[in-house]
Amino acid sequence: MFCGGGSAGHVTPNLAICDELKDKAEVCYLGTDGIEKELCTKADIRFSEYDAVKLVRGKFFCNLAIPFKLIASIRQCRRILSEEKPDLLFCKGGYVSLAPAIAASRLQIPVLTHESDISAGLANKLMARRCQRVLTTFPVTAARFKNGVCTGSPMRSSLFGRDKAESKRKLGLDMRPTILFFGGGSGSESINDCLLARLACLCNKYNIIHLCGKGNKKDCKIRGFIQLEFADDMGLIYAACDYAVARCGSNSANELISLRIPTLFIPLENSSSRGDQAENAEYFRSAGLCRVLHESELTPQRLSEEVDALVADEKLKTALERFVPKCGNVNILREIERALRQ
């Protein structure tokens, strides 16, 4: 059984591992009535629903009832787990995983969790002692847990081996350089606004694919501009792109770098973030594998200038060509098999 949700970043990595296991094991999912339910329904994965408890950062009074709500959530999860009787619970961190992990450990069901970011989230910190292993994307993160194991990031096999010319043809793009702009599953208002302010100028030189987030689509009819709220087939989108401008959530960042797409990261750095994206961006920048623009410096003019600098950055392209892609699927499957044997 898999759990995790609240955002696509906690679901799509799980689905990558589900896909690897579909011919080897019976797979099911535990989550909330959120994006995880939608994506599992599309993937035809049996889904059980419960009411999760979420910490609201910076709002003390909103969090006073959390202990009581968590107890109720744990009871829900314990009932579901008792009915499903999974041999193992695989968590992807985040608040949606906390109650299932506690319930599973009390039922003596083995638990594994995976942390994508350099700095572990609160849920994974709370869950760690209940897990056989805390799997991580980055080596430095694994070193912070007594039971930490660096496996790398789970990635969908459908992202790799796609044909660029065919992908551009399917999307109706010409052979000019194509730049992907996206700000995560819900989009980024600041990136969206700055892009649209410079859209005509940028589309004179480049094709633009803009994943704007649900409810953010605008009526813009400009040659070479494609705007989508969400892409079901990110492999097609990535294959068509020569460059990217993106937030720096660990999953998408690892995908872009593993696909050797030169990227300008604009990490989320506001009060609703714990700073994980900035840490991820600095990690990749220090390795010479990306460019970074801080959100405090983001303006339409600066964005346009940084896009031109990205396209002209031959040193970055050389570093990415030398980079050996790292997909964590094999290592994660090995840890799942190991946990089941114990």
Image: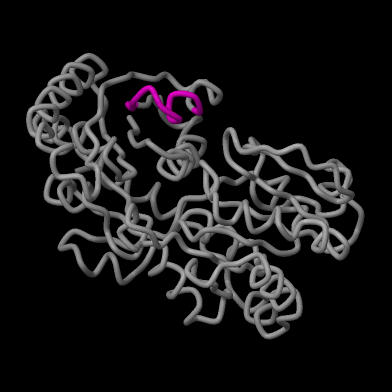
Residue 8 placement, left or right of 81: right
The verdict on residue 324 being magenta is: no
* Depicted 249 relative to depicted 55: above or below: below
The verdict on residue 31 being magenta is: yes
Q: Residue furthest bottom?
A: 315
Q: Which colour scheme appears in the figure? A: one colour
Q: In which quarter of the image is the C terminus?
A: top left
* Image coords of residue 56 (percent x, y): 24, 42
Identity of the residue drawn at 30% across and 72% down: 140
Q: Residue furthest top?
A: 83
Identity of the residue drawn at 78% across and 44% down: 226
Residue 283 placement, left or right of 51: right
* Depicted 239 relative to depicted 74: above or below: below
Residue 320 placement, left or right of 209: left
* Image coords of residue 163 (percent x, y): 80, 52
Q: In which quarter of the image is the N terminus?
A: top left
Res 150 quadrant in image? bottom left
Res 307 quadrant in image? bottom right
Identity of the residue drawn at 58% across and 75% down: 291
* Image coords of residue 142 (percent x, y): 27, 65
Give the residues in magenta.
Answer: 30-39
Which one is in front, 240 or 198? 198
Which one is in front, 299 or 31? 299
* Image coords of residue 249 (percent x, y): 46, 56
Count of numbered marks: 0
* Depicted 248 relative to depicted 78: above or below: below
Res 81 quadrant in image? top left
Which one is in front, 113 or 240? 240
